[in-house]
Image: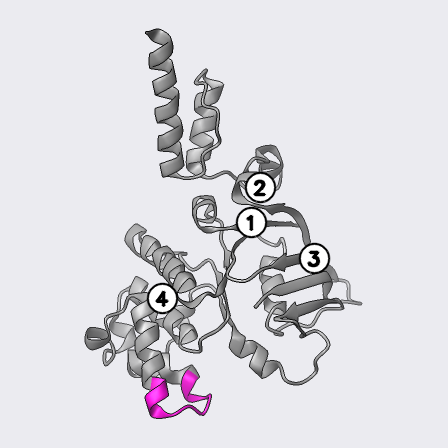
Amino acid sequence: MSIVVKDLVYIYGEGTPYETVALDGVSFEIGDEEFVGLIGHTGSGKSTLVQHLNGLLKPKSGQIFVGGTEITARKKGLTNIRRKIGLLFQYPEYQLFEETVYKDVAFGPSNLGLSETEIDQRVREAMFLVGLDFTAMAERSPFELSGGQKRKAAIAGVIAMRPDVLILDEPTAGLDPRSHADILDMLDKIRKSRGVIVILISHNMADVARMADKVIVMDGGKIALAGTPAEVFAQDEFLSAAGLGLPPITKFIREMRQKGAKIGSNPLTLDEAEEAIDAYLTTKRGAGA
């Protein structure tokens, strides 16, 4: 599975006084099993872009290929594409509605015409992958769960469809630190166990730096930057001008360097920062000796 986007253009309110170019010549590629961080300030075009990837929006021009199939050229047959691409908007737990967690997770697979045995297998697998104990949770009302558990139940409903691409818009928004970490660990586990593409929309630069293989930065409906986390977060002046920041640990190390600490690397995570600081202190001690 891969995603290829070529010269995508989308205009809101075309021909009206409120006409806005939301996507302006957007092009990129995502390979098999890649974890992509999609960042940009509010209104930069992130959410509009991902709604094109499963056909919820149709572009004014441009092409989108999902697994080699051009979905922008199709007027029918998008149902199968949408089964391959799981899209979760912010606060998906607000869409929980069934009597039990089991029924909520089973809702999507039940509409695929699967056997009861297959549906049950998918529900159990999805609940395991998101970290919900089947025995303890399956027959509980989703409205009795904690905020983090509700979020996991909503994600399980998408996972049970067995998508090839998982797109999440701010999946940790509003969660406590423990639930925040649990959701990120869950995404990593799902990608590794299912081999899916994950596209994460986030304003949390530390999460993007730690999780992503590739980062795409949107600004004014265009792709302003794209590359590895190290490549993108090296452009601190541009990111600042675009209303974005650096991962906190990267910012801290750069402040140390400005104060005279000769730390040669630009760490993006705590583990990388620990190694860089240890190397700096070792060198400093050696020079002092």
Mark toward the start of the polypeptide (2 vs 4) = 4
Task: Give the Cα distance between marks 1 and 2.
Answer: 7 Å
Residue at x 36% of width, y 38% of height: 271
> Which residue has dot 2 on it?
232
Q: Which mark is residue 151?
A: 4
Tag 3 secondary structure = strand
- Residues packed near mark 2 inside 10 Å, few (<14), some (14 to 19) or many (20 plus): some
- Could you say which quadrant of the image residue 11 lies in? bottom right
| Residue 147 spot, x, y in % from top left | 31, 63
Residue 267 sits in quarter: top left
**What distance separates the C-alpha of mark 2 from that of mark 4?**
30 Å
Circles 1 and 2 in contact, beta carbons < 8 Å:
yes
The magenta-colored residue range is 109-119
Task: Look at the image and tell me whether residue 98 can be seen.
Answer: no
Is residue 235 in sight in this rendering? yes
Residue at image location 61% in from the left, 71% down from the top: 67
